[in-house]
Image (cartoon, helix red, strand yellow):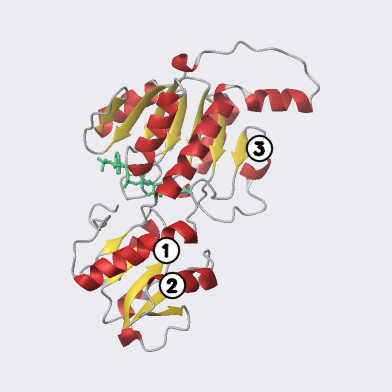
Amino acid sequence: MAILFCSSLDPAGRWREALARELPHLETRIYPDIGDPGTIDYALVWAPPPGLLAALPRLKLIASIGAGVDHILADPSVPRHVPIVRLVDPATTRLMSEYVLAQTLRLHRQDLLYEAQQRAGIWQWHEQPDPAERRVGILGLGRLGTDAATRLKANGFDIAGWSRTGKTLDGIACFSGGEGFDALLRRSDILICLLPLTAATENILDRRAFDHLPRGASVVNVARGRHLVDADLLEALDSGQLAYAILDVFREEPLPPDHPFWRHSRIVVTPHVAGAAEVRTAAPIIADAIRRAEAGLPLRDVVDPERGY
Ligand SMILES: NC(=O)c1ccc[n+]([C@@H]2O[C@H](COP(=O)([O-])OP(=O)(O)OC[C@H]3O[C@@H](n4cnc5c(N)ncnc54)[C@H](OP(=O)(O)O)[C@@H]3O)[C@@H](O)[C@H]2O)c1
């Protein structure tokens, strides 16, 4: 019995060591050295090449090295009878909430404006609103969105969130559905995207969405690059409809050197670091999923392929 590890982003050697410690009875094979495909029971993947998972006849479990599974479901040949679990790691949640809180505070405290003023040698004071006057809207109230909302709320911000199904969260205005989307946008000075990438959410950060935000709002995208229509963002920034965009994820990663986002004075680029998976904390969670699959126990954090997350 073997685990197939396939990711061009994650440290294969460290994963192999960690899995050997957790699951010494299983061999870990690192793509492309997969050996006999008929002896692979489990696959641990990030963006596997199309057709790879379908070519493993004994596959019992697919585990995503990340909270999202769009990089797996993008391959239509992925066998539908094999359960897919995603990585739900409290360490990732903490990292993500730290990032969201840090960037929200940065926008709230007008840091990007003061940084621009420093570059131009301008000593100028701007009125500083109270956090309670700063309306933050979070798209996606799942594991990450809910934690970020709670942390922002604890810092005094006026928080609202949007999800597919209706929710009740203490002290957070909850919206859902198409009308709820527009209502959330209208009351978001800072809009944070923490949605999974699905057919329903692709290109959701487009001109229409930006036009519904209050003039001078800012956008933080920490979900996936394909939520954002790049050209619409540039247009909204250049027209003044949006003040700033803080982006951790991009349609193409690494962001190509000639992409206009790199040099835009009101865009902040970070290299997909908001909530990156750590082998140390993630390996025991993946190992637990494999042990559960081996023992025939109910799996945790199973993805619904029809829903797309
Ligand atoms: N930048 C990074 O480093 C990084 C790290 C980790 C994750 N991520 C991204 O963050 C995403 C969210 O992760 P998570 O663990 O919070 O996911 P999750 O627990 O599955 O939560 C997803 C949330 O989005 C909502 N949603 C899904 N489709 C929707 C739709 N069509 N309309 C409205 N709401 C919708 C869900 O609504 P319901 O509650 O009604 O189901 C849920 O509240 C991941 O999919 C991944 O792409 C990025």
Distance from mark 2 CB to nearest ligand 1 atom below 8 Å: no
Q: Is residue 183 left or right of residue 95?
A: left
User: Disc 3 designates what residue?
Assistant: 264
Q: Is mark 1 within 8 Å of ligand 1?
A: no
Q: In the picture provided, is 40 more to the left or to the right than 269?
A: left
**Pointer 2: what residue?**
21
Going by the numbered disc 3, the residue's amino acid type is His
Element type where label 3 sits in the image: loop
**What residue sits right under mark 1 in the picture?**
283
Residue beneath the point at 38% across and 42% down: 144
The quarter of the rendering in which ligand 1 is drawn is top left
Q: Decide if residue 39 is in sight here.
A: yes
User: Where in the figure is residue 208, as x and y percent of width and height?
Assistant: 40, 31
Is residue 228 something that shows in the picture? no
- Residue that appears at 50% across and 38% down: 98
In the displayed orientation, state which residue is furthest to the bottom: 36
Mark 1, secondary structure of its residue? helix
Q: Quadrant of the N terminus?
A: bottom left
**Circles 2 and 1: CB distance less than 8 Å?**
yes
